[in-house]
Image (tube, coloured by chain):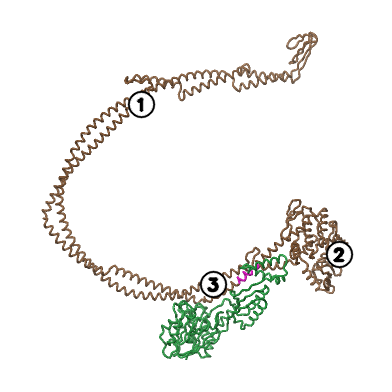
Amino acid sequence: MRINEITLRNYRGVRERTVKFAETGVTVVEGENEAGKSSLIEGLFLLLEVPDSSKSSAVESIRQIGKDLAPEVGARFRLGSSEIEYRKRWGKSPSTQETTLSIKGSTTEQVAGRSAHDRVSQLLSGNVDEQLWKALRLQQGAELKQGQVMTGSLGAALDAAAGGGGSADAHGPLIDRITAEYGEFWTPKGRESRVLSGAREASEEAAARALVLRGTLAALEADAERFDQLRRAREAVRADRVRNETRLREVRAAWAAVEKQRAVVERLGNETDRTRERAGAAREASMRRAQLVRQVEDSDRTVAGAEARAKALEPEHERLERERTSADGHHARTHQEARSARALRDLRAADESHWNELLFLDQMTERLARVNENEAAVTEAMAFIEAINVDADGLRRIERMQLTAVQARARADAEAPAIRVRALRAVTLTAAAGTVDLEAGEEREFAVEQPRPLRIADLAEVSVRSGSGAAESLKAAVDVEAAYSEACRAAGVPDVATARDLWERRQRMQQVLDHAREGLRQDLRDLTPQTLAERVERLKKNTALYVARRADEPALPASLDDAKRLKVIAEARFESAEADEARAAEVLREMLTALEQAGNSRRQADLEVENARGALTLATSALAEARSEVADEALEAAETTLAAAARVAEGELASAEGLLRESNPDGVRAELGNLELLLERLDSDARARDNELAGLKERLSARGEEGLAEHLAEAETDVYRKEQDWESIRRRAGAAKLLYDVFMRHRAEARKAYLQPFKEKLEALGRIVFGSSFELVLSQDLMVEKRTLDGVTVPYDSLSTGAKEQIGVLSRLACAALVSADGGVPLILDDALGWSDPGRLEKLGAAFNVGARDCQVIVLTCMPDRYRSIGSATVVRLSGDE
Amino acid sequence: MVRFIHTSDWQLGMRRHYFSDAAQAEFAADRIRVIGEIGRIARERQCSFIVVAGDVFEDNAVDRRLIRQVLDAMREARVTFYLLPGNHDPINQGSVYRSPVFDAAQPENVIVLDAGKAREHQASVEILGCPWPNKHPLEDLVAAGLRSAAPPAAGRVRIVVGHGTTEAMGSDNPATIDLEAVETGIARGEAHYVALGDRHSTTSHGTSGRVWHSGAPEPTDYDEVDAGNVLVVDVDERECRVERAPVGRWRFVTLDAPVNGLDDIKQFEARLDGLGNKPQTVLRVSMKGTLRLPERLELDAVLERAREVFGAFETWDRHTDIAVVNDAADFQALGLTGFALSAMQDLQRRASGNGADSETAEDALKLLYRLAGG
């Protein structure tokens, strides 16, 4: 779209005004406030959008107050290749309302009235991107933000710039429809919408319902089958019971017969037992008699054997007695030898101790002598040290004071005035110190220590007064010297040299003292000199006593070494004698043990003989007594008779037991028990089945009334439909998602490609204004995120208002320039750039010059200076009264 | 000579889940209506009675209102009905025939053949029912029925009513009816007509001409060859005449259509238009061919219209294979440019592959075509 001309008539304060605009480049419309600059653009929008019959407040606000003239706007503009002349008059009555339209292109078209309005609306919607049209119109006073410029036209233009298809339509509506379709099934975050999840859940729920019903119906059918099975089983149980009852009667009869036979067996058993007992008693009596006879015979043999064994032990006992006597003698001899060897060994050990004590006595005596010597040295050294008053600190103090005194005296001497007199002829001088005679030419110097005149013969008296400094120095020297003398006196020395000499001597004496004390410590250790002396005395007494008391023979060894040697010999002899004695004692002990055992054996054998004889006596008398009661023959006859009777009774019992076994009492008992339990179980089984049958019958009757089969059929139909729905929705959702995802991905990729040309254009314009280091970071939707200048990157929001305004204007200019190839829309700036300084405005002028080369820019301003620097601008000046 | 009607497999209470609610209601109503129609024929043709050879009901657990409706319809028919419990409605404890509703609503002219023994119908005819005791009998119930019943008295016609498939149909079910045994029984005079149910197509078995499956009075599925009949039977010891009487209104039709281009679609649409009695026609179509996207959308529209006019309509997915080619010209017309064009080309590439993703891509292309105003 290109605006060529706008005409206003009776429009607010404007009677009539026509403004022409350059098709490309910048047209600056200058005029003071209220000159009607903004009315031009407002009028154009009213013309394009508001029908001539409108009574809207927008139309009412442009009417001239107090006049009846209808406001009118006309415009000439180009859309694509069509030249359009369009005019509207908003009369208050239809007769004064008018709309005319003339279109010149490949064909010519003249339309009027409402049709004209509709035709223009149609043309605009087909050719002008409304969003861009709004984005590129900067109204007076509106906050200058970044325009949302990613609109259809720009998108297409950028698409073209990025090598796309170049269509004027960038598929906005299609994207909207794809998004709407996607939105039906998916949330913006890509989760399933209620429609999609609802269809799936409905399908699952239907399937679950059908499953439950199928289960219920299957259970019903199973119940019916179970009922038939149960009924058959119940009949089988009944038949079983009848059969088993018959059998029970038979088994009970068999059990009665068994019981009868068991009584017979029991009676015969008792009789047999009694007969057996009597036969057994007779047999035992015979056996006891035979045993008595055997006991007499055995005792007889035992006596003879014991007597023989006692006799055989005697020779061995006698031999052992003899050997013991011999062993006793040998043991006594070895014992005597051991005792004398021990006595000698003890003597030799005492000799060695004696010699050792003598040696110790010598050593102690020496230690005592050294102790006495060192004690004397300590006493002497300590007396010396105590007599001297000079210690290390005292010496250092005297030395320091002496040095100070010398220094003070030297300073006083140096500072004291002096009179040097040279005699011109022989003269006598009288000074404080006395009289001095000087020869001609002789010189003499006098110290001026006190204000006492120097008399030169009788010729003159010379008085010299010394300065106060000299006097002070002298006084200081005298004070210090007095302190030094006092220190020496206190130390008991005349001077420092004496003090130093005394100190060194004291040091030497201290070493002597330390040495003596160390000697004492080593010799005394834990003793005192007195205990040491006592010890020496005790040793002397002991050694003398030992010699006195010792036997003469054998003689005392001559030395310690001899004593040690003799002790070793005595010990060896003693050990040998002691071993011999031990061996002899062992032999004797063994002998005594053997002898004791032999004695025991003999006593044991004697006892056995005695016992055997007693037993024989007892057995003989018992046998005689038994035979006197019953003779041997009577016993044998009774045994034979009773054994025969027992055999007869046992035969009868075995026969009765055979009959009982044949009747199989265990088998009959088991079968009887089993049958009784079986009948009980069959009854319980029959009752349980009856109960189950009754329950099943009731359940079948109740469930059969519910029409389950048809409910299931309905549920399965529902499953089928819900599955179909779900499948259909799933497919639609899948298609919508894929379409949406693919479109969005491709659009994002394309936008990435758009970004570059827009960025390049904007940066090119920006470099004119901000300098060659100007760079930008843009978002996907072409908004400026960051600006870099001279290597410093700043977020857009942190930029100054002026910089934001300049970038805002430049981004619109870049947009307008990019879309201009396909017609685009004009960039309209209504009093913008209020925040920009003159330097920037000048550079912005250059940027406008370049950027607006191929597009239309309309600037409305009351500050002509702001745009003065746009070289190629077409300037239109408005005066207020046109 | 006795005349009666042989029918079976009413399967009342049956639903077809691919029917709409309205079609299902009409289907159900027609299946009750046909009882009246059978009664009318019986009266017109002076039939003594009607035997229903099993599966009167779809299930033992049918809706109790249906039982009343069915018994009412039979009462109004004013002819004696002998109903045989079949595999769908066996005479077990849960049987519909033992339900309190059946018991209360059972009219005098309705007799359930619930025991395997002969039942006299007038002096000259006896009916030997071989009911299913449960859903899984372990023997040939007809053979068992013939074995257990003494031969009919001389001059008395015996109609045996059974349910199940015959050996000729190649079943290894233990309850399969031994056709040879049946024919032997007929030859011995133990049976004069064997009325069978279970097979929904009208079928004669063996060589005697006395063994028939009547088929269902209303068709229930696509694979039924000759359904929709009842049989009017004249029989005595000497001869047997069987005549089909069509009673069904519904039909199940399978159409196979090639779809290669708009002409085929037009022809297909004409074939659909040519089918009469659409509300009672259940239609299944299988289609094969290659279409461009706009053609595919046109076909979808034709199918959608068919769905509205036929009693029921479904595409036979197992036998349908339509490839959609993405013709460049079709998409050029949409005027897509730039990223929209590249996105479309991306989808075309995906659609030309195999698998679920290609199907989704094809759906996405269809959607794009529609949204872009194609």
Relative horizontal placement of residue A194, taking residue A242 as reference (left or right): right
- Vertical order, A418 against A290 (above or below): above
Q: Chain of mark 2?
A: A
State the extent of the magenta-drawn residues as a range. A725-736
Q: Secondary structure at mark 3?
A: helix
Residue B370: image location, x then y, percent: 69, 71
Mark 3 and mark 2: Cα distance apart in space: 79 Å
User: Label 1 belongs to which residue?
Assistant: A568
Quarter of the C terminus of chain B within the rendering: bottom right
Magenta segment, prevailing SS (helix, strand or loop): helix
Chain B rendering hue: green
Q: Residues within 10 Å of mark 3 (few under 14, many from 20)?
A: many
- Vertical order, A100 against A488 (above or below): below
**Residues at marks 1 and 2 on the same chain:** yes
User: Label 2 belongs to which residue?
Assistant: A20
Contact, CB < 8 Å: mark 1 with mark 2? no
Residue A7: image location, x then y, percent: 86, 67
Q: Residue A734: tell me if it is visible.
A: no
Q: Earlier in the sequence, mark 1 or mark 2?
A: 2
Where on the picture, by quarter, is residue A832? Answer: bottom right
As drawn, the chain in brown is A
Residue A293: image location, x then y, percent: 14, 52
